[in-house]
Image: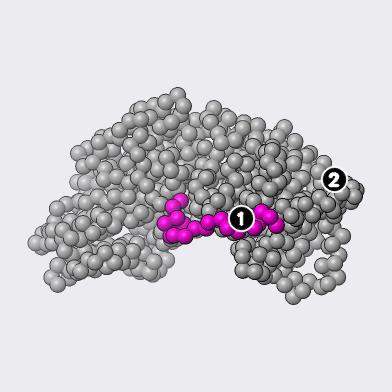
Amino acid sequence: MAASRLIDIHARRLRQTGRGYYTIGSAGHESNAYVAEALRPTDPALLHYRSGGFFLARSRQAGRPLADGVRAVLLGMFAATADPASGGRHKVFGDASLAVIPQTSTIASHLPRAVGVAFAIGRAKKLGRPSAWPTDAVAVTSFGDASANHSTAVGALNTAGYCVAQGLPLPLLIVCEDNGLGISVPTPSGWIGQALQRPNLTYLSADGDDPDGARATAQEAADLVRRTRRPVVLHLRTVRFLGHAGTDVESAYRTAREVAAERGRDPLLALARRIGSRALLERYEAVDDCVTRTAAEVGTEPTLKTAEQVLAPLRFAAPSSSFLPRPGTRPDAAGEPPRDEPSATGAAGVAGQTLAQAINAALAAELAVRPDMLVFGEDVGRKGGVYGLTRGLQQRFGAARVFDTLLDEQSILGLGLGLGVSGLLPVPEIQYLAYVHNAEDQLRGEAASLRFFSGDTYRNPMVVRIAGLAYQKGFGGHFHNDNAVAVLRDIPGLAIAVPSRPEDAAPLLRACLAAAAEYGQVSAYLEPIALYHERDLLTSGDRGWLGAADAPPDPGFGRARRHGDGADLVIVTFGNGVRMSLRAAAQLSAQGIAASVLDLRWLAPLPVEDVLAEAARCGRVLVADETRHSGGVGGGIVTALVEHGFRGPIARVAGRDSFIPLGAAADLVLLGEDDIVAAAQRLASG
């Protein structure tokens, strides 16, 4: 506790001299060390940014000298590459060897993942699968009182109670460290105590300046969770010293009397009084010397020097063939993916299938060969999905692997994050693309950032199935026809696959799952709803949109697929645009214009090399972008062509910058076949 306080003081001194990069401290919260003491160093911990006492106590629990923990914290403050938490990318508390998972913890955004970790402990045991944690582990997470008002915290608490109501084990200790302030905004007296008392959650409280009481209550809470496998909320009342951060001037919003009153609640002085030894001052000075000496040593550590170093955890990589099992094969005894070559095309089982049937079959095939894979979301279990995409999977693979969740996208993704970091392979479903926006930070701030902020020491493999895009007939309007994918494409490190043809469904899903298993890749598998049950291509009854048994081999991870050999121009597109462009190409052919269609299939990583190759072959490029003109996919394609020196004619057609209205009015703002034909005619005649 003394080391945590002195690190905070030293951080201010460093910042004043232009050294060190972080001054949000734990001063006044050091009593969270009692929580660490009540747990085991193998219990997964997801901590917020005032957890210095907890982190140093856990380091000591693991048998390490105090200087090791101090060094780890200071390495983060100096943004040193040797930082065990993030490799110099951010100041967080984390260390894989201590089971401390680095968190951004901005506004309790890590709490949904914490629920997922606790859920994973119980689910892995039920499935008999290996887990990153001991079978009797307790997950612990901490957050501040101001964050208790955020939807992520409220949703996580609700989900924890919901799991109990379902009879599911959820060994989670939830610690709210209540210092009474959200930067400058005071928390109403008594509010946190009321807000934390929720159905099916055991509530305990303690004062951080009562050493005996806080230690006993923390131990009671930890033991209760471990014994009952049910969540407990520990309300730990603390104080905040040194302001919110180094730049915070408390006198601007707190009176001198208010600040002075809290000095009597100092947890460090309270523990000193409890110990009552005259040698305490000498011990405190020895700790101060340790911090000062370690800071001097750490100050010379190397930091990140190149963009390549910074970006290393975010690089896309194609999975190796050993992680691409053929349907019908079985995993080996250790549970590793079977060491088989992928099937030649991935299409043999989709002949005559719709896109929906092909995705359903692909999910079944992958569940059969990946025993650590779980499929879950709203209505995916008994009902089989609102469009039938998961029909029959629960009956075949059991409710432990294919299951329904509560209606909360943040919690659905949080479950996936916790399952992934715990060693399982989650495939959550978000029912509609428009619903992703309710929970987008779970992808941006938590899922895609974990490898980055942990220096790739932690990973949360996950494939998020999202039903989306526009053109759905009879069940429309904005929330069921959303074409806004910019929010996904803007997330560093997130792969985005878009199957349009049935024969691409399995290869794309298999590639996402293999990359997740091998590299911890997080992917969005974006399914065009309007193409789910489509059968025809050019004329009614031609069955041209059903799966083809003679499809060419899958191009691979991050690669596009070309349809046709026309060389007058190439139409670059994806999703619903593929079918529209193929129909447009047929019209153009009748007019003597030979157009080929390039299905991107991947929006991230964007298959730029394939686009450039087709541009060079044809000399003219038309980008048919079903997303919005501003922030749409097409802008990235055109930019890539220009940046790589393509000098031929380029045209782009896209949807309007509008929400999608109900009924026929949608056609007024969406990209249509006529738009593609007209643009191609202009391009070919230019």
The residue carrying pointer 1 sits among few (fewer than 14), some (14 to 19) or many (20 or more) residues within 10 Å by Cα, namely many
Question: Which label's residue is closer to the chain start, 2 or 1?
Answer: 2
Mark 2 closeness class: few <14, some 14–19, many ≥20 residues within 10 Å: some
Q: Secondary structure at mark 2?
A: helix
State which region is magenta: 292-314
In screen coordinates, is 112 left or right of 328? Answer: right
Q: Is 189 on the left or on the right of 504, as rendered?
A: right
Q: Nearer the viewer, residue 162 or 97?
A: 97
Q: Is residue 295 found inside the magenta-colored segment of the image? A: yes
Image-quadrant location for residue 43: top right
Q: Nearer the viewer, residue 106 or 53?
A: 53
Q: Residue furthest left?
A: 592
Task: Tell me if I can see residue 446 in this picture.
Answer: no
Tell me the amino acid under the disc marked 1. Val
Residue at figure coordinates x 60%, y 45% from the top left: 95
Q: Residue at x 74, y 44 (%)?
A: 35
Q: Is residue 624 above or below residue 508?
A: below
Q: Are marks 2 and 1 in contact (CB under 8 Å)?
A: no
Question: Which residue carries the number 2 mark?
Answer: 213
Q: Main secondary structure of the magenta part?
A: helix
Mark closer to the observer (2, 1)? 1
At 81% from the left and 50% from the top, the residue drawn is 283
**Picture layout, residue 629 above or below residue 55:** below
**Residue at image mark 1:** 298
| In-front residue for pair 134/162 | 134
- Amino acid at circle 2: Gly
* Residue 324 placement: quadrant: top left
Where, quadrant-wise, is the C terminus in this rendering? bottom left
